[in-house]
Image (cartoon, helix red, strand yellow):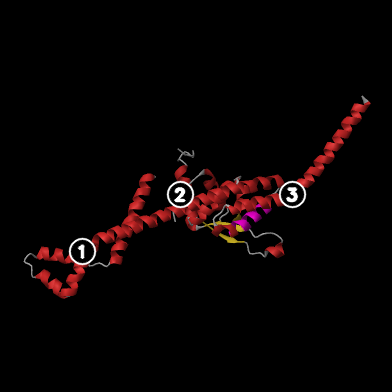
Amino acid sequence: MSKPRMTAPTLRVLNILLAERREELSGADIARRGYIASGTLYPILLRLEEAGWLVSRWEAIDPKEAGRPRRRLYRITGVGAANAASVTNEIVAPSGATVWA
Amino acid sequence: MMLTAIGTFLVMLLVGATANQAAQEFRGWTPWITKKLIERAVARLPENMKERLREEWTSFIDDTPGQIVQIVRAVGLSRAAATITTECTSAHSASRLQRLVSLLFGWVGGLTLLPLLLIQRSRLLRWGPWQWCRVMETQNDAVEALLKNLISGAVVLSWAQWQATFKVASVLVIQLFRQRRR
């Protein structure tokens, strides 16, 4: 499992999931909270899941009974949380300014 | 003047009625459009991801409020599919390259050592392993005897072991190459 590429939207996704560590969020929840376009969001989610930073599962409902498709719910893992925190520390200078370059 | 006012009123009424009708039409067509857009995006995905992402994206669009936003997001899914496919394909081709180089290293390494292996094999068959060791030990130079024993032991490694050794070497070479590229 390689380290996923760190971009601003990736950090946003990680921060959202880190803030709601005990909750499981669907793709739509993450997109809404982070103002992330669908074209950007899903590659990020899959990349982070492949790296073991996130885990996902299907919502436990019967789509026929519920009358809607199942959501895929994402949760940050311990590894993901530790890495996200370290990446955030790396890119934020002691003064609090973000260092991208 | 009166006629102009009536005309304007009628035009506005017509535009209002048409706009309302168009909005209703649009509302009716949105699920069909989004479904088609999702299908188009799913069609671009690798086979093993199609089922999961079809259901996931359908619920994603379902959870999105507003029909225009739904369409915008459904259009965006095509870009997501393209990125996911590119990433999967590049990972796949990298592993294919790794397999190819590993196979090449294994065979070249193995074939280079094949004559030595055959000579050693015939010696072992002729004398037996213990006899071969005794032959080595009768030599005066103890260090030379030890070295010869070690070399003969290494040469006697089986074909599969040599191939495995060269495969490991090939993986290391590829990793080194990738690190340099970064």
Any mark on residue B116, and which? Answer: 1
Answer yes or no: do the residues labelled 3 and 2 have beta carbons within 8 Å? Answer: no
Relative placement, left or right, of B67 versus B178 is right
Any mark on residue B16, and which? Answer: none
Q: Nearer the viewer, mark 3 or mark 2?
A: 3
Q: How many angstroms separate mark 1 from mark 3 (CA)? A: 75 Å
**Kind of residue indicated by mark 1:** Leu
Q: Position of residue A75 (x, y in %)?
A: 56, 57
Q: Of A101 and B24, which appears nearest the observer?
A: B24
Residue B24 magenta-drawn?
Answer: no
Q: How many angstroms separate mark 1 from mark 2 (CA)? A: 53 Å
Q: Which residue is mark 3?
A: B29
Q: Which residues are magenta?
A: B52-62
Relative placement, left or right, of B84 versus B135 is right
- The chain carrying label 2 is A
Q: Of B160 and B20, which appears nearest the observer?
A: B160
